[in-house]
Amino acid sequence: ERNPYYLCCRASVYVWKNDKQKAEADLTKAAEIGYENDCQALLQRAIVFSELDQHQAATENLERAFTLERDPGQLAELSYRLGLTEYALNRKVQALRSFEQAV
């Protein structure tokens, strides 16, 4: 339980199993370990937050990931995920911009 990315992946499974308490516990553990400079962990955290309908938290994690990532394929994935969260937050113009960047 020392890898924030794996903790965030497990949190996603807990959400799928409808065990939000365990999911949030894993997100907390990931935060304690330090996920802030791990792009993959930030992306996975954003996915879990979206699954928990915490779209603003998802957006914040994705925006942080953008500051770290340089790979064009990964940037497209981040843009796509950001578009989904912006859409869920009813920010349609921002969502469209993110989707266009993903393509």
Image: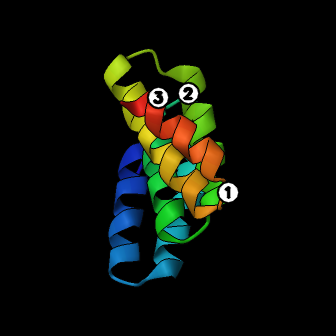
Q: In the rendering, at what x and y percent does residue 43 appear?
A: 46, 43
The residue shown at (36%, 18%) is: 72
The residue shown at (38%, 36%) is: 77
Q: At label 1, which amino acid type do we have? A: Gln
SS class of the residue under badge 3?
Answer: helix
SS class of the residue under badge 2?
Answer: helix
The residue shown at (43%, 26%) is: 75
Q: Which residue bears the numbered disc 3?
A: 101
Q: How many marks?
A: 3
Q: In the rendering, at what x and y percent does residue 40 appear?
A: 41, 37
13 sits to left or right of 66: left
For marks 2 and 1, give the CA distance.
15 Å
Occupied quadrant, residue 27: bottom right
For marks 1 and 3, give the CA distance.
20 Å
Q: Earlier in the sequence, mark 2 or mark 1?
A: 1
Q: Earlier in the sequence, mark 2 or mark 3?
A: 2
Q: Which residue bears the numbered disc 2?
A: 66
For marks 2 and 3, give the CA distance.
12 Å
Res. 34 visible in picture: no
